[in-house]
Image (cartoon, rainbow, N blue to C red):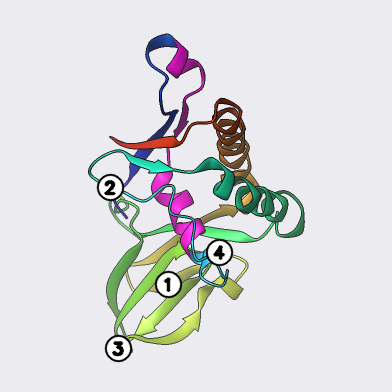
Amino acid sequence: MESYQIKLTINGLYGEFAEKYACLIKDAHVLNRYFEESGSKASEGPIRLLRREGKPARYEPTALFARLMRLLRRVSLEHAQRRFYTGVRFEPVLGAPSPWQGVMSGVDAQGDFAIEAFGLRASLLRAGVLAQDLSLLDVPQWEIEGGRYVVRWDSLKNLFKEDLVALITVCEESMAKGEDLLATVLPA
């Protein structure tokens, strides 16, 4: 779960004019994960707009517009309060907590385990097999002797609505100008 940002600009625009219509997605790695998971069931596949690529990538805005509108509807209305998990960390009884990660391993009385918490589900795995769905808990965490593993989450609406609105706006501007979108990866 390496964080990065994506800056979207309209092809053919330069300088201050390009900046006027630019869109910066600060937690692109998180929104990209949502695009991957929500698009896995779509016939068109996932939206690839926020993938981490070495060089600027071009995208046709008309193809993205309708799909982004459908996701905005889901995020704003239908699934607004659905949880999206953004990490797990270990909080020891004594000492400072570890940094947030998408996957974390540990050992308890039953043996080795891993907790995956990056996406629409948080899971406790043992030997690669689902042992417990932490998504079903009111407070998703796993307690062991000496501390606990805490899962961080927020609602789809809180995490993604503003970014989806910004993406739709830049798509509209790009379509109005008859140009493609350029996606450039920036360090977090």
Identify the residue position indicated by label 2 in the image: 53
Q: Choose mark 3 or mark 2, whichever is in front.
A: 2
Q: Residues within 10 Å of mark 2 (few under 14, many from 20)?
A: few
Q: Tell which of 38 and 61 is nearer to you.
A: 61
Q: Earlier in the sequence, mark 2 or mark 4?
A: 4
Q: Are marks 3 and 2 in contact (CB under 8 Å)?
A: no
Q: Choose mark 1 or mark 3, whichever is in front.
A: 3
Q: Choose mark 4 or mark 1, whichever is in front.
A: 4
Q: Which residue sits furthest top?
A: 16
Q: Using the image, tell me which numbered label, if any, was put on residue 143.
A: 1
Distance CA(mark 2)–CA(mark 1) = 38 Å
The rendered magenta stretch, by its main secondary structure, is classed as helix
Q: Residue at x 56, y 72 (%)?
A: 41
Q: Tell which of 143 and 134 is nearer to you.
A: 134
Percent across and percent down for residue 137 are: 59, 72
Q: Which residue sits furthest left?
A: 54
- For badge 2, the amino acid type reads Glu
Percent across and percent down for residue 67 are: 61, 53
Identify the residue position indicated by label 4 in the image: 38
Q: Is residue 61 left or right of residue 4?
A: right
Percent across and percent down for residue 24 are: 45, 31
- For badge 3, the amino acid type reads Ala
Q: Choose mark 4 or mark 3, whichever is in front.
A: 4
Q: Using the image, tell me which numbered label, if any, was put on residue 127.
A: 3
